[in-house]
Image (spheres, grey):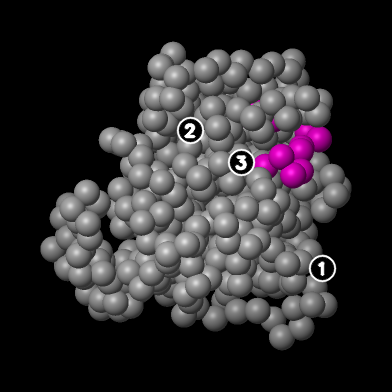
């Protein structure tokens, strides 16, 4: 019903301009309504209008993880109030250039009693993958539209606390190393709040897709950025590991369902242009139509961003003679942002689908997994014999949550293994 309502609403406030037509072999959807416009009509103030999220005037004086302000909010699932205690912390962290910023985390404490040890914490990194702060979990937990709520409730039912950081910051740049810093600083913040009683808690990380990226980046940076944060284990999957390879895949026209992957490059371009405007400069690289698409993607959640960019290869919107591969700085930056730059020193459980139409394992994931293995990482990796990105999110979560739960209860993370089986599909099959 929500989707029907969205489509019926039409392209309200069609600004910036949007291409009036597309080539016949591309996605023909017109400009879609934006989720943030719907959120702004709700009685819960969106982050861009809520002074609670404002920077303190002396932000540079704050230490990483130091709390700026806090509040108690109501968590909802599908719009229905959920019986948990949720405290939000605004804390200091760093952006991609090491400059001080503030972002928020939501700490959810269940009513389930816990005794015998400090209550364990699962830091749950949602796949935010959006360009608007209204899509961040500190807001969607309040509206009841946090899209991974079902997964988080399993840990709450076991009595664990769940930490849900806005690890893309207020300005929603993703696939950068500051994601890891924001996760780590959220864990410092929850320890700094004495009222939560989590200062000595065991911590594990979980995330899939964009959430997997935030999780593994935090694990990779822990040793150098936050050695005071102890992580018992990180479970993640479905994350783009080699961003240069992912850009090559998502920039070109892919056949069939794999053409959905084109949206990841459009969305990545829109997000990275915020932190690296001179490298990802739409005015220099893209045609007017391409610039309009990037501008349109500047204030969307992942759902309409995906529908806007799927089956529209960005390759067709470069100015003559331009491409990501030949543009100064693009490929070196993407390689620097890839997951093999910082390898975790704590236990990792990593899974990926054998056939993933968004993030093909053979070119984007498995080469990085092998680098982890050769570097001696405490790694458990497996490919799942299943198709489709979201299916693997649901199926892979089952063993991942069991592993996280066991590690938090004091069990051994188990031996290293690398079950990087190739997909049982013909060589060159799209999405492998």
391 or 150, nearer to the observer: 391
Report the side of 1 relative to 45 (left or right).
left
N-terminal of the two: label 1 or label 3? 1
Q: Would you name the residue on which mark 1 appears?
A: 63
N-terminal of the two: label 1 or label 2? 1
Q: Position of residue 310 (x, y in %)?
A: 33, 50
Q: Main secondary structure of the magenta part?
A: loop
Residue 242 is tagged as: 3
359 or 349, nearer to the observer: 359
Q: Secondary structure at mark 1?
A: loop
61 or 410, nearer to the observer: 61
Which residue extends farthest bottom? 57
Q: In the image, which is nearer the foreground, mark 1 or mark 2? A: 2
Check contact, mark 3 vs mark 2: CB within 8 A: no
Q: CA gap, disc 1 to disc 2?
A: 39 Å
Q: Badge 1: how crowded within 10 Å, few (<14), some, or many (20+)?
A: few
Up-down relation of residue 427 to residue 211 (above or below):
above
Write the start and end of the magenta stretch as one range. Answer: 339-350
Q: CA gap, disc 3 to disc 2?
A: 10 Å
Q: In the image, which is nearer the foreground, mark 1 or mark 3? A: 3
Q: Position of residue 154 (x, y in %)?
A: 50, 34
Residue 72 seen by the camera: no
Report the side of 149 relative to 405 (left or right).
left
Please check the rendered image and state whether residue 343 is part of the magenta-colored stretch, yes or no: yes
């Amino acid at each position: 019903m929500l989707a029907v309502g969205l489509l019926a609403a039409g392209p309200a406030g069609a600004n910036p301009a949007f291409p009036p037509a597309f080539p016949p072999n591309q996605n023909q959807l017109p400009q879609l309504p934006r989720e943030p416009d719907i959120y702004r009509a709700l009685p819960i103030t969106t982050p861009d209008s809520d002074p609670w999220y404002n920077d303190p005037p002396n932000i540079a004086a704050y230490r990483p993880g130091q709390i700026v302000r806090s509040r108690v909010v109501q968590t909802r699932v599908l719009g229905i109030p959920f019986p948990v205690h949720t405290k939000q912390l605004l804390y200091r962290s760093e952006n991609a250039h090491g400059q001080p910023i503030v972002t928020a985390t939501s700490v959810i404490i269940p009513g389930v009693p816990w005794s015998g040890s400090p209550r364990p914490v699962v830091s749950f990194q949602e796949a935010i993958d959006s360009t608007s702060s209204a899509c961040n979990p500190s807001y969607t937990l309040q509206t009841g539209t946090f899209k991974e709520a079902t997964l988080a409730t399993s840990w709450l039912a076991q009595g664990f606390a769940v930490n849900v950081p806005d690890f893309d910051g207020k300005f929603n740049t993703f696939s950068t190393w500051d994601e890891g810093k924001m996760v780590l600083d959220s864990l410092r913040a929850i320890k700094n709040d004495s009222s939560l009683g989590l200062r000595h808690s065991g911590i594990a990380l979980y995330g899939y897709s964009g959430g997997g990226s935030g999780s593994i980046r935090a694990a990779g940076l822990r040793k150098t950025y936050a050695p005071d944060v102890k992580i018992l284990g990180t479970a993640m999957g479905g994350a783009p590991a080699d961003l240069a390879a992912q850009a090559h895949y998502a920039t070109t026209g892919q056949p069939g369902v794999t053409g959905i992957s084109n949206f990841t490059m459009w969305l990545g371009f829109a997000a990275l242009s915020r932190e690296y405007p001179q490298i990802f400069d739409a005015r220099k690289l893209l045609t007017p139509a391409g610039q309009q698409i990037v501008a349109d993607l500047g204030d969307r959640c992942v759902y309409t961003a995906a529908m806007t960019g799927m089956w529209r290869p960005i390759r067709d919107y470069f100015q003559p003679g331009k491409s990501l591969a030949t543009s100064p700085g693009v490929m070196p930056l993407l390689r620097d942002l890839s997951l093999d730059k910082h390898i975790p020193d704590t236990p990792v459980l990593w899974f990926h689908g054998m056939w993933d139409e968004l993030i093909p394992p053979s070119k984007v994931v498995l080469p990085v997994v092998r680098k982890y293995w050769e570097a001696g990482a405490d790694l458990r990796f497996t490919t799942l014999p299943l198709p489709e990105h979201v299916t693997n999110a649901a199926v892979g979560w089952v063993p991942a949550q069991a592993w996280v739960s066991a590690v938090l209860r004091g069990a051994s993370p188990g031996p290293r293994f690398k079950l990087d089986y190739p997909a049982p599909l013909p060589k060159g099959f799209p999405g492998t």
